[in-house]
Amino acid sequence: MLRVLEDAVGVLVDGHESERRDMVRHEEAVRAEFVDDLLRGDGDVARMVERAEPFGVDLGRPHHVALVAPRDGHGLGDRVALVLGRAVVDRCGDREVLVARKDRTVVVVVPGGPVAGFAGSREQTVGTVLHEDLQRLGVTDPCRVAAGRAFSGAYGVARSYEEAQEALTFADRLGLDGDVVQARDLLVYRVLGRDHGAIVDLVRDVLVPLEQVRGGPTVLLGTLLAYFEAGEVATEAARRLHVSVRTVTYRLARVAELTGYRVSVPQERFSLQAAVLGARLVDWPRTSLPAQPQGCCKVVKRAAELGV
């Protein structure tokens, strides 16, 4: 009798555990599906508001989306998502927040209002707080956190997600060293990136003449970049490049000679800086610029024949 009772209890416990695991898997699947639809931003608004209710998410409020992405080319493990989810819940509670895995990243959705730890000074941002939590909890996976700005409404989440994705892309293309990137700090790159053709034209017209230098444009391009990043101070640029100030000024003069653009003239300096930023976005000169459309060449040639 005792053996039968023991077996019955074991079966009951196993069934209960199996049911609990199935319920957890179902909840995770529902959450992941909801997050996917929310990030796409193309669902029916009324339906999305209804689906958000069980998760305690008020889509009428502004929300940030942050992405935690691997820096080694591999996907983040389940442990990162689990640890980050617990940290966010501990900080904000289990309402108004969503943490889910998507592709190779972990997506974190938090309110843009006055939530402890996620609002305040410029230094204390969603991205920096999440990165601090990862370090504090002993996550050793090399990763980068990108955060979009806060926007209201169901489509606001998708917009913030798009900004976070673009921030990750720009950080990779520009070779940024920081572990945290804020979309609001990269708005100038978004402006440049919206018209790829215009960037290519700018780089071609302003910087391609630097290819006349023996050894290619890399040295002069690097000098321009260091000069702009140093606040247009030749002494600081020389220190960063480990060369003399005279070398920096010579190279800038050489740039002016080849391109016709001088860093001493505000409008020309702006064109040079925009072109340098554009070159980083299109990975020039490591990647060749696309050829000009044949139709444009014909128009230019015909205009030259007519003396226009």
Image (cartoon, rainbow, N blue to C red):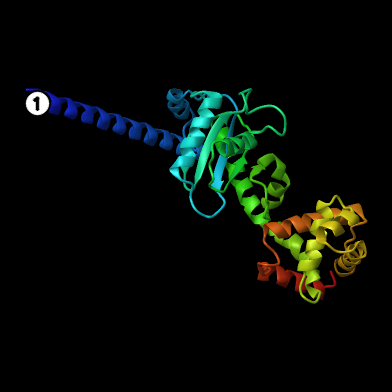
Depth check: 308 or 163 in front? 163
Amino acid on which disc 1 is placed? Val
Give 104 or 18, whichever is nearer the viewer.
18
Residue 116 position (above or below residue 286): above
Q: Secondary structure at mark 1?
A: helix
Image: 118 above or below 167: above
Q: Quadrant of residue 209?
A: bottom right
The C terminus, quarter of image: bottom right
Disc 1 marks which residue?
4
Circle 1 Cα neighbour tier, 10 Å, few/some/many (<14 / 14–19 / ≥20) = few
Residue 207 position in % (x across, y down): 79, 65
Which residue sits at x=46%, y=32%? 44
Q: Residue at x 17, y 29 (%)?
A: 11
**Whether residue 38 can be seen here:** no
Left or right, 50 with respect to 90, comes to: left
What quarter of the picture does the N terminus occupy? top left
Task: Please report the residue visible at 64 percent of the width from the left and 22 percent of the height from the top.
Answer: 114
